[in-house]
Each structure stands twice: as C-alpha cells, then as structure tokens.
Amino acid sequence: MTLTCPQGHPVETGQAFCSVCGEAITPPAGSNAARTATCPNGHPVLPEESFCGMCAAPLGGSGAAVHPPQSKRRSPWLWAGIVIVGAAAATLAITQWPTDTTPTALPEAGSTTSSTSSTSSVPPNAAPTLDPIADQGGFMGDIVNLTATASDSEGDGLTFSASGLPAGAVMDSTGLVTGTLVGPAGTYTPVVTVSDGTTEVSTSFSWVVSEPAPPPAPPEFAATADWIDTAGNVFPTLLA
C-alpha cells in the first residue's frame, strides 16, 4: 500500500510532514500514534523532535532562539530569498529569488519533476542618425566631391548607399560621392540610406545638372584711322 499525505502526495513510513506540500501527517505515515503535542506556534510536532518542522521554533520550553540543523527542516521553505521546489524522492531545484525565471507548473501528486521557463528582455536597437544633405547644383562635366555623414549612439558600424544620383556620380559604402557629371541635364532627387546592420534611415535632396556653359564670344575689333601716309593711304589699327 502506498502511503500519502492529505493532499495525495506519496510519503514514507514514519514521515511527519509531506516533502512536497509541507502538510503535516497526523499521525505520522504508517503510525497509529496520535499526535497531540504542538510547538509554541500551534504546529503539530512529534515527542522526539527538538524543533518544529514547520516554523523552526525550539521545543522543550528552553526558549532558545537556535535554528534547527538543515536535516530537521521540511519543505516547502521560503528562506532568505531562496525558493526550494521539490517532490518526494526527487532532487530539489534551488532558484535564486527574485529572478527572471518564472515557474509555470507545479508538480502534481506523485510527480518527481518540476518545470520552469524563463524569458529575457533585450533593449531595442537604436536607429542611426543621418545628417541632412544640402541641395546640389552643377554643370555637365563638373567633377563631383560630396560626403554624406551619420552617427550611431550605440557605436554600431554604418554603411551608406544611394539611388537616383545623376549619371557619372557614384557613392561608396563610407558615404563619399565622386565622379564626373555626364548628364543629361535636369533635376535629380537622389535618396541616401545609412544602415547600422539592423535599422536603415534615409534622406533625399535635390541635384540640378545644367548644360555646359557656352564658350566665351570672340573679341570684336573696331577700325580706327590711326595714320595716313603722304599718298593719302589710310592704315587702320585694329583695337579690341
């Protein structure tokens, strides 16, 4: 015959308290002796016990405030911030408290295992900050030298990219735009993006590319009667 406590948990012969729920077994398991003695706090005790198994109160009227040895204490306990969860004939699982580990199930009667699950909180990634880029302008044939800048509060490495640049202009991964504008002329709206490996941030700006400036006009010369020879011939001097 299997002996059980009032809650149905298995116990051993002579056991006065259930090691799963702490329920007092009156009389002790397998014993016909009546339990009439109590500790100063009213918990039932056995005549041979020196300390109460429920509250650790000393017995015998000595009044000494001495804690019983560990072997005299019975589970379950909440002792100095330590939670002990166990079952009959099972190895106790000790968990520091408080903790981010939350028990999700209690052992059923007769069970010798306990189940826990834990979750951890990871702070969200902070997005990088991309500095605004001023509008640009230039002529076809101009050499380009433009740099996009950004920062990251967490010190993550940043990678740049761009789309919609005028033909001839390219951006590398550091945000540097180089090249020679080849046209066609018009207004472009490039989009620059920076990424920290997790989050991307983008900005746009205007870039006007114009036809090349016309070459300068040739100088105009005016004829002036600078001098006349004795025969009446006029020799003009061309002035710019």
Image: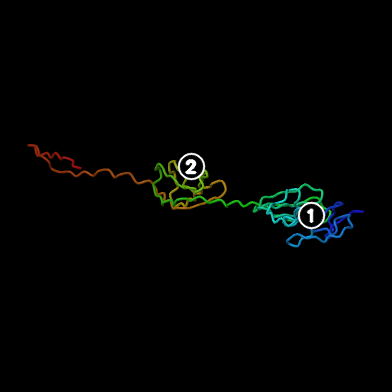
Q: Secondary structure at mark 2?
A: loop
The circle on residue 174 is 2
Which residue is the extreme one toward the right?
A: 1
Q: Nearer the viewer, residue 64 or 10?
A: 64
Q: Secondary structure at mark 1?
A: loop
Q: Nearer the viewer, residue 27 or 175?
A: 27
Which residue is the extreme one toward the top?
A: 230
Q: Nearer the viewer, residue 177 or 231?
A: 177
Name the colour scheme: rainbow
Q: Amino acid at mark 2?
A: Thr
Q: Quadrant of the N terminus?
A: bottom right
Q: Dot 1: within a 10 Å radius of its alpha carbon, few (fewer than 14), some, or many (20 or more) residues? A: many
User: Where residue 56 appears, x then y in whole percent?
Assistant: 72, 55
Which residue is the extreme one toward the front?
A: 62
User: Where residue 167 appears, x then y in whole percent?
Assistant: 47, 45
Q: Nearer the viewer, residue 213 or 107?
A: 107
Query: In the drawing, does residue 137 fall left or right of residue 196?
Result: left
Identify the residue under disc 1: 20
Q: CA–CA distance between discs 2 and 1?
A: 64 Å
